[in-house]
Image (tube, helix red, strand yellow):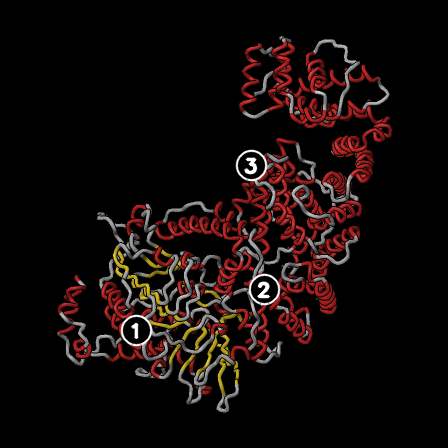
Amino acid sequence: MTWPSSEPLSLSRLTALREEALAQGKAHAALLFQLHLLALEDTPQERDRLLFLLPDRLRQLEDIPTCAEVLLRLFSGRSWDMSALSFGTSLLMEIAFLLREEAECFSPQAAEALAQRINQTIRNIYGACTYVYEMLLLYEIVHCHGGQPGAWIIPLYRDALEDCLDTLAQIDGASVSDLLLIVGTLLGKDRDCRKEARLLLERCVALRQEYFEEYSPFLMTARGGLMDLCYGMGDVDAAMKESRTLLSQPENEATRSILCHTHLLTADILLDRLDTAGVAEHLHLAGALLRQLPAEGAQSKWLSFRLHTGWARYYFSNAEGDSGLSQMELHAKQAYRLARQEGYSGEDTLVAINNLLYPLAYSSQDDEAVRLLEEAAKLIEAQGLHHTRAAAIVGVTASLFGLEELLPQDMAHSLSDFSLSENDIVLRFWSIFNRAYSRLQDRQPTPEQLEQLSAALDSCQELLDQLRSGVTSASIALKRARALLALREGSPSAARRWTLSALEDARNHQELHPQGMLFGTVLPLLPFLPDLLDSDALQALLDELARGMADRIRRILDCRDEEYILNSLWSNTVILNFTLALADRGIVTWGPDRLYELIINGKSIYSRLLRISRMRRKSHPEDEPIYRQIDLLREEILDGKVEELLRGVRRDVSGPEEEKRLLELSLAGSLPDGFQWLSCSDIGYRLSPGAMLVDYYAYPATVSGQLLLEDMRYAVFVLFRHGDGSLRLRRLPSVDFLQVRRSLLALTSGADSQNARSALYRLLFQPVEPLIGPEVNTLFLSPDGDLPKLPFGLLGPEPDSFLCDRYNLIYLESARDLKADQSIDPVGREALVIGNPDFSLTQATGDCPGLVEKVPFTKLEAQMVAEKTGAVPQMRRKADKHALQDCHASIIHIATHGAFFGEQEEDEQAYTYTPNPMRRACLYFAGANDWLRTGKQDPVLGNGVLTAEELCHCRMTPPDLVVLSACFSGMGDVRQGNGIVGLQTAFKVQGARVMLLSIWEADDFASLVLMDRFYDNLTAMPAGQALRAAQRYLRTVTIADLTEAGWFDPSRLRRIGLVAEDMRRMSRLSPDHRPFASLRCWGGYILYE
């Protein structure tokens, strides 16, 4: 409803506009149109309507006929004698509201002209001795003026009001403070006027202190304006003084935005001083306040932009390792999105681009980095931002990574044409330091380069001295760089001195880093520490890091972003690997107890994270609406990822992924008891008589920190009871990783299985045997690396010798899971039995890669297990993956196809961690083939594919027993420190007590017979013994035994359809024939507890 001020409006048009405004509830607009209508036709009827349209606020405080007369005369544009009329404050404010409507409904220019005419009228009546009424109107007029109010507000203030502020303050100090806040803020935008602006804002604060309490939002707003101005002027001390005053005030609905802004500005001030202490706390508090503000408001979006920018800066200052860079990229993306979406200034957009550019370039995402640089160059050219700080920041980052060389020449010039201000200490420091530190990684710099690096670090120290911030993460990083420089210069004593100084500062200022500053300082120095410290100092340092490991893990788990937690815990594992490598060299002289305690608490980080997440969800029901949103986003993400994996159709799910991570960050804190540190004794007390624990941990035997296959070893720890019942722990010689891998490949391929069995036995188990007493009948195995893919029961020195003949073998993800062999009698327990799914619900022609074929024996297996447990088997179309979503069964038995998809491009040299490893392990259910063919999900059954990641987040009651009678159900992603991450991890997260899995493709009939025997055995013995006995039976069973058990009965054969003829042929073999004696038939089953 905006009309040019030059366009005349007819009576009929004004009447229509008035009625439209009334219908929309716009009372001030309706009153304005009525006044314009009266200016054209002044009739008694329309005057009566004017009285009717006046707001109730005026009716309560003013003389209504007088108010109507004043408004009519002021807005008519005609000459009236107004000397007998009075102006109350409420009437003046109503005039201001009408002026705002004039600007919106007609034009800002019309509102300005009207305001000037009204002010002149008031001056003519009351003279020029005071300007209280002009000032009162001016306060609201500022808000209704489109364009640049500073162009006429500031001159008006200086010409008409500046000389009489004292007089005005005596008349209406509160209103004068409003004027001071407005004009001071406008003046503060001009660098040349900031001193004058500061005087006005200080006077505003002083005036409001006379009228308002400290906790009043009116006084807090004034203090916030003064704080902003002082920060912009570089007076950090004054800004921090106002910040402390503001943050001491209580939070309420009226003060939340002010407090949020104050926390954000305080974080900026600290970061500008290269000081990260307290920054995370301010940002967390700002985020909590922001979440209580209206999400869609312009102010909330601006605060959100600043919050994400603050987090990006914080993680830049602590960006050691992938965890910090991952968080920096997440927040930088959000700030960049908001800058583009909301049309923020060019400089703000450049800052957002730079914050995103750094993690992209650091992680070698060059294509995306170059795209951002091109956008930055165009923005600099379009808005003439060449000499701004924001352009300089982008130029520094581009130069650091050599990205300007990838741009067209004209664009590269836009980014290289910058200069660093002498006063911009922070930008100059990071520009010089990052270049120098990058070059220090070269182990053989020339003398000339060393001289240049020394001068660069001296310049960094001079810049820090100017900041006078004391010990900061930047000052510690500088000492760390000086240590490396001294090492390169061949001065080990100086290198040691700088290292010890950096470590001491870090030790005394742990708050500077989210995982503790000592850890943050040591992590990037790990490859150099043996050269920087003597063995005593190095051992003392590792002792200290080990003592802090429990608290560090708790702090990491307290974060709510799963990806950040995984990367941070991986960094923690690096310290563990380093310690083991030094112990191998004799540099660290820890006993096996100290070393094994680190493994107990540092192994299997992935499943531990997911278990903590589930515990947190149960403990914070108030966050359930957020969790539901996360569930929906996760489903969308998984649909896209699984479609890419199985159908080759790529979908961009980066948006939902970022939204999910942001929602995770908004969740409540972690559980007080989410992680408990366990000692070797704590584990040993769980070891029952007759049991032994053998723990294998894969680690690199190098101090470089790189996980290369040729450097990998298995540390072997054995926990057992001596003959007198006392606990003993032994560390056995480490085992070569590659030798184990080669033998394991030979075993699984079947090419040379007997020699492979013997070789693996000699490598992995023969050293353990001397420690095994005659009373031991159960071995708990906690494998790592490739070893979860190995059925230890097959190992033995001779062709007919197997470990499973001598021991019950039970697998553990970690020693933390140790408990006595579990007894689970299936009789009388609620069971969910799924088998024989209809993978294809519709008839389709043509080939399609990746389709799964029906497994006939799964029908018989499901019926058999259902009979033993009293369950109703879910088969064919009812074999729905969603049956697991809210499952409360004590026993879960799934007979279907399973699969694990390895990475398409595996680097055979690297042995690293990648996120989301459980998206590539899955089970197939009803409807899977239809989705694989068409990409269309069944409205009830979904896509028919259940990944391990999806399974992790089902809301099931912890089951006692899970049996996955599916090929490769025990396979998954091999991850150092985590063993196999796959379907068993998901069920472990769900709290399963016992899991029976297959790691090989087995004969279907053999699997059926084994399952039948296993369930029968469970009624009389623990699960480990039940599997051992079932495998022994399967290995030795004859055709005569099978016939006697009724497996070849005609009635049973009719139920299995197509493969019945194969069964009949088998039944005609020699009665003494053992059809399942092959390792492939019985050896691929393992039991996890």
Q: Compare marks 1 and 3 and give the one earlier in the sequence.
A: 3
Which residue is depicted at the point 17% across and 64% down? 1055
Residue kind at label 1, given as amino acid type: Tyr
* Relative vertical location of residue 705 with respect to residue 939 in this rendering, above or below: below
- Would residue 546 appear left or right of 937 to someone viewing this image? right
As helix, strand or loop, the secondary structure at mark 1 comes to: helix
**Disc 2 marks which residue?**
672
Residue kind at label 3, given as amino acid type: Gln
Which one is in front, 838 or 650? 838
**Disc 1 marks which residue?**
1015
Residue kind at label 2, given as amino acid type: Pro
* Residue 542 point in image, percent of width and height: 64, 71
Question: In this rendering, does residue 232 appear at all?
Answer: no
**Disc 3 marks which residue?**
341
Give the CA separation, mark 3 to mark 2: 40 Å
Q: Compare marks 3 and 2 and give the one earlier in the sequence.
A: 3
* Residue 371 point in image, percent of width and height: 54, 41
As helix, strand or loop, the secondary structure at mark 2 comes to: loop
Badge 2 local density, few (<14 within 10 Å), some, or many (20+)? few
Residue 487: image quadrant is bottom right
Which residue is depicted at the point 60% across and 20% down? 30
